[in-house]
């Protein structure tokens, strides 16, 4: 794999992983449009490691508090869900929310992984998902009331957003976009929905990277360590910068720029691959 290709693909992964525009769609489509060779499984693992390091580093202080209070909450294991939620502080609830919200996509990923990779990686599927879920994101922002911060997250929120996240297995959906949509529809404000989406990405990226690593170990793909290191560094740095930029942009202008981008991208894909 050429270093130039690795640089641009890693940059795209880092910039799109946490934006509501689908990183998987861009990593599939860019080589198709530019007639590049497939980047290979090892490189996919590397750029996922980079984005995982970025989000963990960015939220390291939050994660420390969440983990500390989550461990304390284990002493409430004999309580009912309602009683435990009342006794826990918001950090502990958030920690449980991330775990609960990860279950649906984990189960769906294990059951549907081969089917998704075989039947749902076509440009027309990506185009349809890009447009449909882009419009749903716009509707969620336009119609849903934004009234709650992340300190008021509930078990129900975590379950529903987790179910939304399972749809991100469809290329073009965007894991970030669909979890933001779910959060907004439930009444979280934009920044709260985005922060929960980012935290929810940590176990998901870890699990996805783990599955790809197992596939890599079982395969016979040659490893170019220099290219992989470049992928980790570029995707990690670009993702770290993108997180802060995105949170600031959400407060100022909301989701509309990303919705418009998705509609344009979907239209271009329909033009090239349908007509």
Image (cartoon, grey):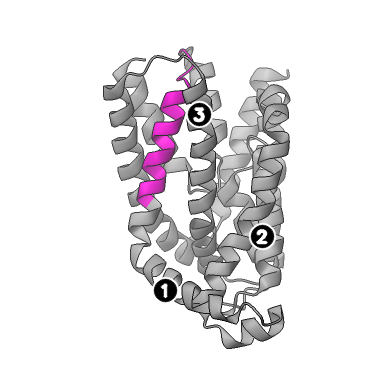
Q: Is residue 67 left or right of residue 177?
A: left
Give the residue displayed 70% in from the left and 82% down from the top: 82
Give the residue displayed 48% in from the left and 49% down from the top: 18
Quick one: quadrant of the C terminus? top right
Badge 1 marks a residue whose secondary structure is helix
- Check disc 3: other Cα within 10 Å, few if <14, some if 14-19, many if 20+: some
Quick one: quadrant of the N terminus? top left
Among the two numbered marks 3 and 2 on one chain, the one whose residue lies closer to the N terminus: 3
Q: Is the C-beta separation of discs 1 and 2 under 8 Å? A: no
In this figure, which residue is indicated by the disc labeled 2?
161
Badge 2 marks a residue whose secondary structure is helix
Residue 187 image-quadrant placement: bottom right
Whether residue 141 is visible, yes or no, is no
- Return the x and y of residue 267 as percentages of the image width and height: 65, 31
Badge 3 marks a residue whose secondary structure is helix
| Magenta stretch, overall SS | helix
Whether residue 132 is visible, yes or no, is yes
* Residues at marks 3 and 1, CA–CA distance in whole angstroms: 36 Å
Magenta-tinted stretch: 37-54
Which label was assigned to residue 27? 3
Q: In this view, does 84 lie above or below 194?
A: below
In this figure, which residue is indicated by the disc labeled 1?
68
Q: Which of marks 3 and 2 is in front?
A: 2
């Amino acid at each position: 794999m050429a270093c130039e290709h690795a640089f641009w693909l890693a940059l795209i992964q880092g910039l799109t992983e946490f934006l509501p525009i689908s990183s998987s769609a861009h990593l599939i489509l860019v080589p198709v449009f530019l007639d590049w060779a497939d980047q290979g499984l090892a490189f996919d693992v590397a750029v996922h490691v980079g984005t995982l390091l970025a989000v963990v580093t960015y939220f390291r202080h939050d994660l420390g508090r969440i983990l500390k209070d989550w461990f304390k909450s284990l002493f409430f294991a004999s309580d009912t869900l309602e009683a435990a939620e009342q006794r826990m502080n918001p950090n502990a609830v958030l920690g449980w929310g991330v775990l609960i919200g990860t279950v649906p996509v984990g189960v769906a990923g294990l059951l549907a992984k081969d089917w998704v990779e075989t039947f749902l990686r076509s440009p027309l599927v990506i185009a349809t998902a890009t447009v449909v879920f882009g419009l749903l994101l716009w509707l969620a922002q336009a119609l849903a009331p934004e009234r709650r911060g992340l300190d008021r997250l509930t078990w129900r929120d975590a379950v529903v957003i987790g179910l939304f996240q399972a749809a991100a297995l469809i290329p073009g959906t965007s894991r970030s976009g669909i979890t933001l949509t779910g959060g907004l529809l439930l009444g979280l404000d934009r920044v709260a929905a985005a922060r929960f989406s980012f935290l929810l990405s940590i176990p998901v990226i870890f699990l996805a990277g783990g599955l790809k690593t197992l596939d890599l170990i079982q395969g016979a793909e040659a490893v170019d360590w220099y290219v992989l290191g470049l992928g980790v560094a570029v995707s990690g740095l670009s993702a770290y910068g993108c997180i802060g930029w995105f949170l600031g942009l959400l407060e100022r202008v909301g989701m509309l720029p990303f919705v418009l981008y998705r509609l344009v991208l979907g239209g271009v894909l329909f033009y090239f691959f349908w007509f």
